[in-house]
Image (cartoon, rainbow, N blue to C red):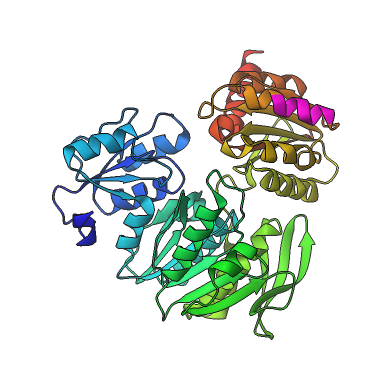
Amino acid sequence: MDRLRRGETRAEVAPAHAHLVGIAGRGMSGLAQLLVQRGMLVTGSEPSSRPAVERLKRLGARIHAGHSPRGAQFLVYHPEVGRDHPSRLAATRRGIDQASVGQWLGLMMRQSISLAAVGRRTASMASAMIGWTLTRAGLDPTIVLGAEVPQLGGWGRVGSGPHFVAEGIEGPGEIGPAAPRLALLLDLVEECPWLVEDRKAAIRQFACSVPADGYVLALEDNPMVAEAVRDLAPVVERISLDRPSDWWGADLREDRGCFRFRAFHKGRFAVEVQLRVPGRRNVLGALAAVAACDRLSVPIQEIKQGLEEFTGLSRDFESRGSYRGVTLVDDAGCDPESVAETLSIARQVFGPRPIWAVICTGEDARSAAAEAGYPTALATADHVLVTEGSQVGGGRRANSLVEALIASGVNAREATGLDDVIRELDRNLEPGDVLVTLGAGDVGTIADAFIRRLSRDHQGR
């Protein structure tokens, strides 16, 4: 960390070479893109061949399946990667400096007007909306996100302006980047793979890292957020869609899943926004973006135009087109609450059309508590296929989840892999159906594979 603390994180360090463990993972891809675009040599270890790997390779990253950081000056890891990981052990033996992705981002942001957002799903949307709005307003920000944004050309961008926008990175006992000048604490939840108390302490530590002359935007009525912002030195403003607050989103009107809302600041009307991204959850992200951009002195009409032009994130109720009359939608959410929200949006957008949900169980589905929430979450779908991706392995959860779904009256069945999913869809989907793919692992590739498979089969008939 010594060279990192001295600020040697840019291309003028020669030869600048960073190795990223799990380079295609959430939060890591955005940093990899930033470092490549700043001229660094970026290598990474990634066992899977998912689309993000190929995109990073096209940008110039060198990615392999092994664990050797040979030749690197710095090793960057997700906070969930422990000290006993082979890449970290190899780096320790070779004397290579190590930092978590949050620590690295914090150091890169030190000289910037920095902003970081944390939360369940709203943080991704709010960060992207803020980054896009600043970009559109001509402020040329640097942006690092956990999700791809087609309008930004990837997981972010390198800018020459003073602003640095980052989506927060969460892991056991750590939330980063630390010490942003603006911090957004949004839809935080207690259900996590690590101890709740550790997470509460990490959230509090993140909030307390904001400098005294900084700014914190906190979600009203969220117990974890309320505890984190108690007695903070920075300015704290609260945000709500449910009741008058410092920033209040009111008069929500829905049309085919997309919302128009009015934003009020301390009781005074600020702006009315018509969103192009569907779902009530994205209204909260947009309201947070209004508040943050206003704090950054972006003219209110620029904020309005930026948000109304924003077209969304990849894998966030992303329309993947249609084939033979079947509409394809993809979403990364796999916890019960996210699944319920996504299918509710699908019902709002598509009305009575039959909905097929393909869900790939991941880490969020491994606990008994999470599994118990799926029958209600998936009840909106007319047909459900449950599979497990290559990153998860085994079929222990998929089988028990299908049994629980059937017992609750959900029309569900298990698929043993991507090929099995495609065969089931090929046999059963009809024109007018809606296919919604949900979750982690390989499920995000189903829409592409489905189109390729059906196209090939159709040509052969």
Tell me which secondary structure the magenta stretch mostly adopts: helix
Q: Nearer the viewer, residue 40 or 230?
A: 230
User: What residue sits 59% from the left and 23% below the top?
Assistant: 418
Asked whether, in this view, residue 234 is left or right of residue 265, the answer is: left
Whether residue 32 is in magenta: the answer is no
Tell me the quarter of the image containing the C terminus: top right
Image coordinates of residue 392 in percent, x first then y, are 54, 29
Residue name at image x 19 percent, y 49 percent: 16
Relative to residue 41, is residue 166 depicted above or below? below
**In the displayed structure image, the side of residue 75 where residue 385 appears, left or right:** right
Task: Tell me the quarter of the picture where residue 405 sits.
Answer: top right
Residue at image position (17%, 38%) is 94
- Give residue 443's quadrant in the image: top right
Determine if residue 429 is in view.
no
Q: Confirm whether residue 338 shows in the render.
A: yes
Does the segment drawn in magenta span residue 401? yes
Q: Residue at x 75, y 30 (%)?
A: 384
Residue 307 spot, x, y in % from top left: 59, 66
List the single residue furthest toward the top.
461
